[in-house]
């Protein structure tokens, strides 16, 4: 079995890494940027802003993690030269790993690649923008799409969607369709809001935290501090994950001396269900709560609807079937029920381990049913909390980067700024990809991100994006998507990072907290421009003056006033650059048992455990990220917390490896309905019958099957077979 070279996550190993990155880019310079009044560039947990870097909304200092350092240092390192572009042709660029692409450095000048070109070449801003503007001007708006990552500011994201709608399309989407769209759909159906129902204060006061389908030790390390602090004040933590993760067992907090030296336990109970067994487990827990007399009848009767039908359906299910489908022994289920019934408050948190399924929406509804039955919603210290990824992914959605605006939002844009959206329904992210594959997209704009790497079925994605005539990407660095997802003409424009912006920007955390980032000076020399400046330039080239209120884009301040005028809950944004008053968005955190639904009550949903059928020789595979990775960006090949030193591995239970007559390190071919991948075996502690592989490398195996409600691909549940390689194959 692979053995990590550390006995606990975080701690000295993380500190050593931070010091090494400091030396590589300048320790003092790195510290100053981490402490500047700018929101953290990485996860949506939120940090920084006007309280200063490394400070959260509760005033805790130092709040920093390895992810923060990685992102910051990446913007401060080497830069790409024209010689780099001349040295590597398109085929060589397409063969780069994510880590190799990341190591190329910062893009500091526009580059272009056209039909017949063998290399990317440097272009002037005038040339690049002329090509982009001409492409959009010549294209039917219905044959375009606009896409945004969650790294952009609220100002840039808002401008992106209003330009698109003034241009004539609602094909406006963002990366959340491939991560937490299932959360938004489910939560809206439960309590009328698609965001977390808790604040950081709720997490700091709860008695119980349930972490399901998430690995915050690797992906949101600062959240581990909250879990450890919860246990220290007498609370409990339950972790649900098919794979036993080192960082969810033990973590060394650098900010706490005792924890740094000896480590801190993270969980009180660790459940390992089958991949896709979450609904069966959650229904079993609800059944157990009912049988134990743990239902909060007062809350249920006063604040919820549709309980009777759900109760009847749950009580009719057989224990043996639920246990078998979940993969969790009955005694562990009973222990979890006991902890749920003893707690007076609880916060349920999850990530893509719940959303990346064909039944992702129902996964979250099943979790919400459990929370509602115990009364763990609508009061202080309790609620539902999706653990979101990119730092401003929630803000991007809030300011309208979606195929369909809420009517009140659309009406405000129309009445106050004369922007009338097309009457045609817009396409979500996957629908845009399908349209591209069918030859129905001529021009596309990507505001950050790696759309190619975020899609299932990598070969299909390459074909789809390759059929677009012209694509325009705004980015700080090059990634695999720029090379493998090339359009016939590809334009890549270098942007300033958040802490380099000439004007202040704003971001929204997963706790519905809006921060103000001051910006600053560029960390490297070059021709980078702000995202807003680039989008404003494009708008001038493609929009007739009678279809757009140009006063909106004279400055970031004017954009914020427009956001305040039109976006529900964002009224405090208009003067934030002057007042410096960061704020909690109103009407999203519920402490009075009243919810923004038609009835003012939350709603139970009937959820049926799926079959998760597979043949006798098949395994269920989930894609996962490593400790040295953020989304599609891989900073280092080693996964420190899992003990793997390479990414071409399939993680398997020792019993499964032995059953196949194989050994750890053996080369195998993994096959799915969409493709195959040659990897080696790594034995890990995972529920038998289940496997894990690294994202995005394993995307070639991910079928294009989506949740029918959220339209999210099922990255976490893929049927695969595993075949030993012949000696000829392995050499």
Image (cartoon, rainbow, N blue to C red):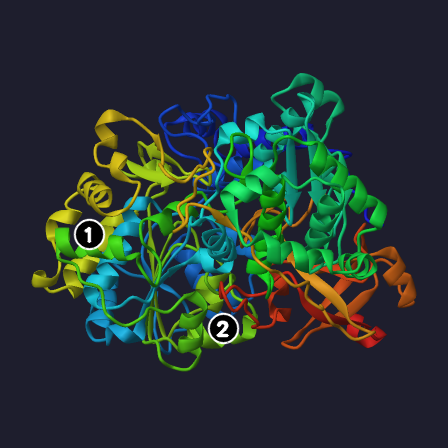
Looking at the image, which residue is at 60% across and 63% down?
359
Residue count near mark 1 (Cα–Cα under 10 Å), binned few <14, some 14–19, many ≥20: some
- Circle 2 sits on which residue? 462
Q: Is 499 on the left-hand or right-hand side of 620?
A: left
Q: Is residue 492 above or below residue 336?
A: below
Which label lies toward us, 1 or 2? Answer: 1
Looking at the image, which residue is at 44% across and 63% down?
482
Q: Among all residues in the image, which is located at the extreme bottom?
A: 438
Q: Nearer the viewer, residue 647 or 453?
A: 453
Residue 646 at x, y = what percent? 70, 54
Mark 1 or mark 2, which has the lower sequence index? 1
- Circle 1 sits on which residue? 412
Residue 646, can we see it? no
Q: Is residue 109 above or below residue 372?
A: below
Q: Is 174 on the left-hand or right-hand side of 353?
A: left
Looking at the image, which residue is at 92% across and 67% down?
661
Q: Is 560 on the left-hand or right-hand side of 76?
A: left
- Where on the picture, by quarter, is residue 250? top right
Residue 105, can we see it? yes
- Give the CA distance from mark 1 to mark 2: 39 Å
Residue 37 at x, y = what percent? 36, 28
Q: Is residue 643 above or below residue 444?
A: above
Residue 432 at x, y = what percent? 40, 71
């Amino acid at each position: 079995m692979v053995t990590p070279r550390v006995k606990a996550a975080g701690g000295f190993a993380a500190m050593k890494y931070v010091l090494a990155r400091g030396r590589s880019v300048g320790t003092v310079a790195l510290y100053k940027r981490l402490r500047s009044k700018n929101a953290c560039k990485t996860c949506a947990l939120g940090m920084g802003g006007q309280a200063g870097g490394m400070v959260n909304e509760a005033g805790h200092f130092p709040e920093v993690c390895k992810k923060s350092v990685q992102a910051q240092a990446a913007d401060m390192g080497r830069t790409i030269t024209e010689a780099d572009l001349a040295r590597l042709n398109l085929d060589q660029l397409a063969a780069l790993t994510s880590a190799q692409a990341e190591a190329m450095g910062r893009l500091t000048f526009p580059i272009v690649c056209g039909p017949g070109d063998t290399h990317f070449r440097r272009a002037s801003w005038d040339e690049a923008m002329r090509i982009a503007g001409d492409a959009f001007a010549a294209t039917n708006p219905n044959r375009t799409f606009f896409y945004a990552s969650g790294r952009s500011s609220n100002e840039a994201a808002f401008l992106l969607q209003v330009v698109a709608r003034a241009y004539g399309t609602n094909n406006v989407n963002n990366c959340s369709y491939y991560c937490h769209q299932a959360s938004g759909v489910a939560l809206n159906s439960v309590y009328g809001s698609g965001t977390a129902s808790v604040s950081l204060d709720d997490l700091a006061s709860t008695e119980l935290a349930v972490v399901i389908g998430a690995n915050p030790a690797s992906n949101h390390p600062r959240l581990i501090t909250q879990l450890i602090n919860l246990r220290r004040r007498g609370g409990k933590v339950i972790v649900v994950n098919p794979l036993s993760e080192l960082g969810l067992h033990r973590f060394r907090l650098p900010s706490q001396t005792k924890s740094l030296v000896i480590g801190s336990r993270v969980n009180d109970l660790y459940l390992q269900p089958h991949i896709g067994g979450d609904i069966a487990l959650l229904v079993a827990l609800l059944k157990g709560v009912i049988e134990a007399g743990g239902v909060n009848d007062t809350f249920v009767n006063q604040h919820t609807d549709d309980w009777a039908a759900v109760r009847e359906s749950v009580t009719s299910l057989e224990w043996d079937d639920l246990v078998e489908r979940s993969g969790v022994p009955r005694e562990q289920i009973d222990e979890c029920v006991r902890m749920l019934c003893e707690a007076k408050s609880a916060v349920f948190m999850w990530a893509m381990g719940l959303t990346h399924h064909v039944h992702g929406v129902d996964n979250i509804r099943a979790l919400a049913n459990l929370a509602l039955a115990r009364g763990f919603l609508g009061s202080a210290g309790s609620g539902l909390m999706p653990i979101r990824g990119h730092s401003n992914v929630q803000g991007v959605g809030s300011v309208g980067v979606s195929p369909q605006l809420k009517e009140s939002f659309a009406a405000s844009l129309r009445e106050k700024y004369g922007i009338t959206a097309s009457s045609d329904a817009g396409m979500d992210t996957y629908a845009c990809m399908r349209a591209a594959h069918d030859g129905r997209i001529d021009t596309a704009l990507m505001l950050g991100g790696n759309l190619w790497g975020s899609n299932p079925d990598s070969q299909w994605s390459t074909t789809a994006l390759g059929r677009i005539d012209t694509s325009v990407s705004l980015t700080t660095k090059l990634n695999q998507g720029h090379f493998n997802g090339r359009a016939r003409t590809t334009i890549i424009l270098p942007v300033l990072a958040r802490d380099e912006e000439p004007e202040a920007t704003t971001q929204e955390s997963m706790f519905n907290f809006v921060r103000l980032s001051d910006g600053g000076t560029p960390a490297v020399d070059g021709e980078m421009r702000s995202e807003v400046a680039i989008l404003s330039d494009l708008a001038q080239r493609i929009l007739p003056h009678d279809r757009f209120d140009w006063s909106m884009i004279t400055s970031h301040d004017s954009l914020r006033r427009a956001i305040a005028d039109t976006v529900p809950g964002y009224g405090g944004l208009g003067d934030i650059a002057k007042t410096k008053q960061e704020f909690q968005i109103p009407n999203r955190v519920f402490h009075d048992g009243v919810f923004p639904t038609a009835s003012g009550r939350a709603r139970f949903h009937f959820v049926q455990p799926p079959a998760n059928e597979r043949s006798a020789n098949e395994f269920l595979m989930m894609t996962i990220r490593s400790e040295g990775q953020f989304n599609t960006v891989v900073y280092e090949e080693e996964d420190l917390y899992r003990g793997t030193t390479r990414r071409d591995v399939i993680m398997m239970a020792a019993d499964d490896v032995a059953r196949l007559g194989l050994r750890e390190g053996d080369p195998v071919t993994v096959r799915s309905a969409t493709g195959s991948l040659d990897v080696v075996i790594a034995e890990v502690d995972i529920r038998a019958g289940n496997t894990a592989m690294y994202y995005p490398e394993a995307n070639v195996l991910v079928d294009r099957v989506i949740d029918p409600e959220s339209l999210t691909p099922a990255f976490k549940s893929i049927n695969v077979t595993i075949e030993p390689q012949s000696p000829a194959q392995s050499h």
